[in-house]
Structure formats: structure tokens, C-alpha cells
Image: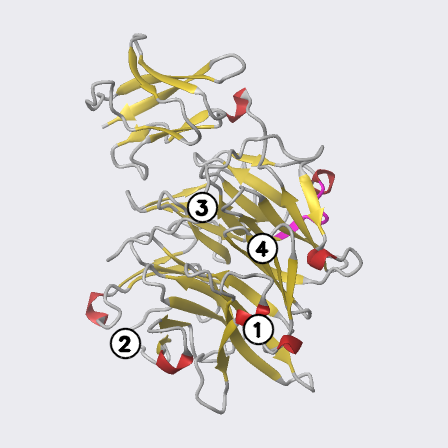
Amino acid sequence: MKMLRVTCFLMATAVFAAAAGADGWETVDIGGDPGDQPRILDMTIDVNVVWLSSKNEGLYAYDGVEWVHHVMADEGLRWNDYGYVMFADAAREKWVTRDRVGPDPWSFSYTADRLDDALTLTDKTDDVWTYYSWDDAEPAEFINPRVFSIAEDSEGNKWFGYRDEDHLSIGVVSYLIENDPTTTDDDWRHYDNALEPYLTQFYDDDVRALAIDHDERLWIGYHERGVDVWDYGDIDDWEDDVWTHYDVTNGLPSNLVHTIYVAQDGRVWVGTLNGLAFYNPRNDSWTTIPGDELPGIQARTIDEDLLNYLWIGTEDGVRLLYPNGTAVALRDVPSAAGLAGKRIDAVGVDGLDGHVWALALEEVTQTTTLHRLASGYVPWSKETFYVYPNPWRSDTYDPIVNVRGVPDGTKIEIFDIAGERVRALATREQPYGWDLLDASSNKVPSGVYIVRAEPPQGDAIVTKVAVIW
């Protein structure tokens, strides 16, 4: 299989610059109008453009300077109602899945609209829209009304996960093979236990999260039944399929899955109703983030920045998670940090200048506020310095020892336990990493090593790391 390795970060922007403002978060008026803030249901970031799907007001986009608003009246977006999922694919085309409420309370239409805006955000004249639908009376692309999650493989093909909390409709996932970006040449595959009971092994039909890992396996997160991992191999050959199921009995802190995120290092993070865990494919193991760091956290959304820190939107504000599993709250009280509500429905990091974006929901009024952390998290301090994995083992998920939490231009030196210098890392921009070689490019033996960091300004600090072959 081809390994999926998608990265959207285009510049090595220093994330550890001082945060803007006293508490960091800025409020950004959606649409540029402070008097009319729509209810936003989802967000995605296409390099540096923030895309927002709304409940009743269509589709918004913002490049940091100008806002663009797509509505049904433009004859592009088919209608304005209930934009559940906002997704930007590797080709930089934007997808939005929708419900439309009809003339009576029981009349609905279900669609996904795809926009190729030719990367000219403010010019709608070159927009190309492609439409996909569900219809219970006529043949259509979808086999279940509500598309609630989208994932993309390394070939640009799309997976669609269906939400069916009432368990009434046929269809768990669909696969769109992209021959060309038109519905006339699309090749669809639909999967469900009811359709192919002897071939598929889905645990449920209420899918809330999808992801493709670096081994091209499909991860399926259910609302009540944990996670399925489908190693489908050749999509046309059922005999090579391998199914694995995870729930509270073998790795997950809860069976209710909110989100699945595949990190750059290959670990698969699963946010649940009652905690956060990650799967390490190198040693086939699960790790639950300790309860004293993120007690009972509901991780609703996850994104990763240039330094491989994870930004987590929770029911109680935004948390920053160091890759070694140490969590930091931006502020203990989210409202004191400038967030309008505790529940965070989406977070994202743009790939051009490192801005962190968050959608905060005020649950009493059901209003959404868009926030931006303009220059990352916190300035350099001794508390931000660490190495991971620690201990480093030959079967670990990471082939290097990562040195994190230091400013650009820091001098990094590695010493053995006797105080002899083993290696000096080149002074550079973040991130730093030690490849377990000495100054003569020989592999270092197992043992304890000292990592010394001397920033351009301030005192040097040291820490230890164990290496085990």
C-alpha cells in the first residue's frame, strides 16, 4: 500500500512567539459583520483560508483580509441550511455536506456540494460546483441521508461516513474513486452489513468520524460502538481485508467517539466522551492520556501544528498537548482567555503563518464565536523544554529523539552520562531532532544521555533521555 503522508505546513513559522494580547485569543467577526454572527457547525482550513459551514447562512471563507460568502442565491451552493461537515481535500477543493429543511417539518434534502474555486477566493466567476445527493426514490450517489464525516486516501479518493442515530437507513460508508471531478465519471462503492453481510464487519451504522492512517487503513469512529479499523488492501479484492475493532475492552476510554486524528508521526488519536487515547502502529499498542492531565476530557476536535503539538478542542476550552503526552490548558477558565464559550466545536492551524483558530459555542444562547490565536501558544521558558520519546526505544513510533519547546537558533548538545560530548545539532529553526548518531555518524549505544539547550538569550538548561536498542 502507498503511505499517506499529507502535510499542509508551508513555512517554518515559529509557534513559540509571544501570544497576541494579554490572554492570547482574538475574536474575529464572521463575515466581517460584528452585528450578525451566524451559528457555525464546522470549520476547515485550506492552507491559510478558513472555511466555515453555517446552520442557515451558507458558506463563509476568510483569508485573514477579506471575507467571501457563498449562498444559494449565487447559483453555486445549492442551499443555505445545516452545513454539517466542512472539508478541504488535497487538491484544495472544498466540500460541504448539508440538510435542507423543506416546506414542512418532515421534508428534507441531503447533499454534498464540492467547490473548485480555482484558488481565487474573491472571484466567483471561475467557481466550479459539483453536486452529490441522497434520494429515497431515485438513484443517487449517497445511500444514507446524512454524510457526517469525510476522509481522503493518498490517491485523492474520498470516503464518506454516514450518521444514522436511529438505525433506519442502509449504508455505513461510501467510497468515491476519483476518475475526474465530475459526477458523470465517478465510480462509487457502498458498504453496509445489510448489503454484504458476509464481506463486511461494521459494528454500527452511526459513523461520527473517519480517518486514513499512514498504512492506508480506514478508521471508523462510531457514536456508541468504539472504532473499527478496516485494512482493505486492494479495494476490489475482499479476500485480503483485515478488520480490527477497538472499544473500552481493548484500548479506548469510551465507546462514544467524537474525533479521529492521524498525526504526522503516524500515531492515531481518538477523542471520546471520557478521555483521549492514541494508537501506536509501530508496536500495536494503545496509550490513554493520564487522567490527572486531562481528567475526563471530551476531545471533540484535533489539529496539529508545525512543531507537532496537538491542539484539542474540548467541552471545556482548548488544550495544547505536547507529543510526549503532557497537556497544557491555555487558561484554566476559558472565558478568561478570551473564548466566548467553553465548548469548542472545531480547532485548526493554518499552514502559512501558524495561526490557531477555534470555534467556541455558547451553549445557552447557541451562538458561535470565531477566535484566533495569532502567533501560537507561549514564549520560550524552561517549562516548555522537553525531549520525546523518553525513553526512546528501537520499536518506538518515532525514529528520532525530538527536542521541543526551544526558540529558533538554540544550540543543542548531546552528552553521555560521563560528560563527554556526543553530538552537537546544527543551530537552526524549529523543530530539532537527534537521529541517535554521534559526531562520526555512528549509532550510539544504549544508555542515558544529557541534552543541553542554550537559547540565544537566557540560561542553558538540561534534561536526560534514555536510549534503549
Find disc 1 in the rendering and name its residue.
98
Residue 235 lies, with reference to residue 250, above or below; the image says below
Find disc 2 in the rendering and name its residue.
198
Q: Residues within 10 Å of mark 3 (few under 14, many from 20)?
A: many
Q: CA distance from mark 3 to mark 1?
A: 30 Å
First in sequence: mark 3 vs mark 1 = 1
Q: Callout 1, which amino acid? A: Arg
Q: Callout 4, which amino acid? A: Val
- Which label was assigned to residue 277? 3
Local secondary structure at mark 3: strand
Local secondary structure at mark 2: loop
Nearest-to-viewer mark from 2 and 1: 1
Quadrant of the image occupied by residue 448: top left
Tags 2 and 1 touching, CB below 8 Å: no
Tags 3 and 1 touching, CB below 8 Å: no
Q: Callout 2, which amino acid? A: Tyr
Q: CA distance from mark 4 to mark 3?
A: 28 Å
Local secondary structure at mark 1: strand
Find disc 4 in the rendering and name its residue.
50
Q: Residue at x 64, y 85 (%)?
A: 106
First in sequence: mark 4 vs mark 3 = 4
Q: Residue at x 51, y 78 (%)?
A: 145
Which stretch did the figure color magenta? 338-344
Residue 181 vs residue 349, the one in the foreground: 181
First in sequence: mark 2 vs mark 1 = 1
- Which label was assigned to residue 45? none
Q: Position of residue 433 (x, y in %)?
A: 36, 29
First in sequence: mark 4 vs mark 1 = 4
Q: Callout 3, which amino acid? A: Ala
Q: CA distance from mark 3 to mark 2?
A: 31 Å
